[in-house]
Amino acid sequence: MFSLHQYDSFWIFLLVSISIPFLAFSISRFIAPTREGPEKLTSYESGIEPKGNTWIRFQICYYMFALVFTVFDVETVFLYPWAASFKELGLFAFIEVIIFIFILVVGLVHAWRKGASEWYQLPNIWVKVTERKSNLAV
């Protein structure tokens, strides 16, 4: 009833594509020399001897900034095919792109309000100023 012979080339390709990375890692594991020692266990910092604890915390704002940049960078790539075939797509595609850009702007405003575009958090000066003004009024 079902003829699976038409998928033989797919299964061969899948088997080969899975086995090549496996074989590459296996061969390098058996051929490469293994040297255990304290130098292997230290963290590498451009040839400089590490000082102190090498596990330090980075602020999340760097990752948030990179994530927002990546999302908007990828989303603008989606606009290129639309712009290349703008004449053939018509009014419906134009309205879809306007909605798409509106969603991007809403996301950008949300990220901006959450502080994802800030490199560091400023101290809350306004709270201190308003507290000082309220204390002077009393």
Image (cartoon, rainbow, N blue to C red):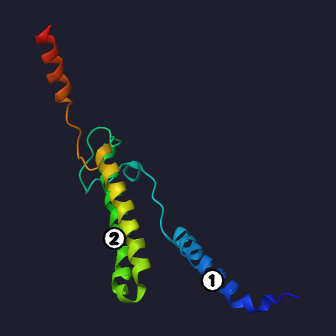
Task: Tell which of 53 and 85 is nearer to you.
Answer: 85
Three-letter code for the amino acid on which mark 1 is drawn = Val
Identify the residue under disc 2: 76
Three-letter code for the amino acid on which mark 2 is drawn = Thr
Report the mark closest to the observer, 2 or 1: 2
Left or right? Give the position of 58 relative to 10.
left
Q: In whole angstroms, how far apart are the C-alphas of marks 2 and 1? A: 36 Å
Q: Circle 2 sits in a helix, a strand or a loop, which is it?
A: helix
Mark 1 neighbour class, 10 Å CA radius: few under 14, some 14 to 19, many 20 or more? few
Name the residue: 51% across, 72% down: 28
Name the residue: 84% across, 87% down: 2
Which mark is on residue 16?
1
Mark 2 neighbour class, 10 Å CA radius: few under 14, some 14 to 19, many 20 or more? few
Task: Tell which of 87 and 116 is nearer to you.
Answer: 87
Residue 3 versus residue 45 in the image, above or below: below
Left or right? Give the position of 45 relative to 98.
left
Q: Quadrant of residue 22?
A: bottom right
Name the residue: 40% across, 73% down: 95
Q: Position of residue 100 (x, y in %)?
A: 40, 67
Name the residue: 20% across, 25% down: 127
